[in-house]
Amino acid sequence: MLIAVIVTYHPDLAQLRILLQALLPQIGAAVVVDNGSSQDISAWAQAEFAQALHVISLGENKGIAAAQNIGIDWAQARQAAGMILFDQDSRPATDMVAQLWQAYGELQQQGRAVAALGPQICDEHSGASMAFQQRDGWCEKSCYCQAGEVLPVESVIASGCLIPAAALSEIGKMRADFFIDYVDMEWCLRAKQMGFQVFAVCGAKLFHHLGEARHQFGDRKIPVHRPIRYYYMARNRTYLYCHQNLPLAWKVMDAFRLLRKYAFYSLFTAPRRQNWLAMTRGIWDGVCGHLGPIPEKYKPT
């Protein structure tokens, strides 16, 4: 049995309904782990989906990683063959789960050590497909899915990601002290260091809201977030550079990407000063190894 784990935080209930209507017919069971939303998600779920959906209300925001781990524990207690993680702002295609599970079976027959399989991510706003990254030492390239392909990739995002139970028991769960941002990347890096592989399944589609808004920059629309998300993004990435035994090539290339984001969101995206302060504080805390939720006194206003 496959079990879906959906993490919510003040969700748009109409959007959450669309996700669940598309997802529930595809899986054996589903659990929503709510991170202290003001809405009564449990009562809403009972009214909308009756017994088809289990809700765990945490009462406070423990972060996406901790919430995922609680949902994973619930799934493991029910002997799930695999868990599929979801954000609240995603919408799977009607055959997404079947495509992922079929690809997993084929890879197993080939003797591959599969950590996770992710779908092709399509931006809900623009319809554009997100590129995956492949790396071989110091060589890195962006690749786009072609129909029917199953590609070994650097990482997949958590939403829509199928994790076989056998792999999870060896690799371990998500790092709760990362709170949010780069949780999925850290897990994929850890899995690959243990000899597992991560795959993109091009026949599986997930429509996802990338970012909280869009910033027009030249002819591109770039996803943007609130300053607090930039704090976690900068902190968790810097922590990996300074405190984890990861390939130097990956650290250098990812640090270059972080510096580009630091410059762009500090100089060209409002609120520039708050973005700069949040990322600067995040980099400092990452160097110092300070994890967990951001201290109240440092929260961007």
Image: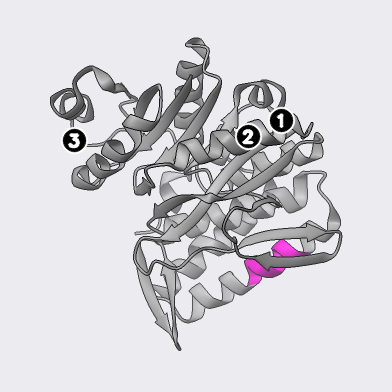
Q: Residue at x 48, y 40 (%)?
A: 293
Q: Was residue 228 drawn as part of the magenta stretch in this picture?
A: no
- Amino acid type of disc 1? Gln
Q: Was residue 256 drawn as part of the magenta stretch in this picture?
A: yes
Q: Nearer the viewer, residue 67 or 103?
A: 103
Q: Residue at x 68, y 55 (%)?
A: 238
Alpha carbons under labels 3 and 1: distance apart: 42 Å
Residue 39's disc is 3
Q: Tell me the quarter of the picture where residue 243 sits.
A: top right
Q: Residue at x 34, y 25 (%)?
A: 58
Q: Which residue is mark 1?
A: 108
Residue 10's disc is none
Callouts 1 and 2 close, C-beta under 8 Å: yes
Q: Tell me the quarter of the picture where residue 123 sits.
A: bottom left
Q: Which residue is mark 2?
A: 104
Alpha carbons under labels 1 and 2: distance apart: 6 Å
Secondary structure under badge 2?
helix
Q: Earlier in the sequence, mark 3 or mark 1?
A: 3
Q: Magenta segment, which residues?
A: 253-259
- Amino acid type of disc 2? Tyr
From this viewpoint, which residue is outermost toward the bottom? 218
On screen, residue 166 versus residue 40, left or right, reads right
Q: Earlier in the sequence, mark 2 or mark 3?
A: 3
Q: Is residue 233 above or below residue 24?
A: below
Q: Is residue 98 above or below residue 253?
A: above
On screen, residue 98 versus residue 301, left or right, reads right
Camera sees residue 258: yes
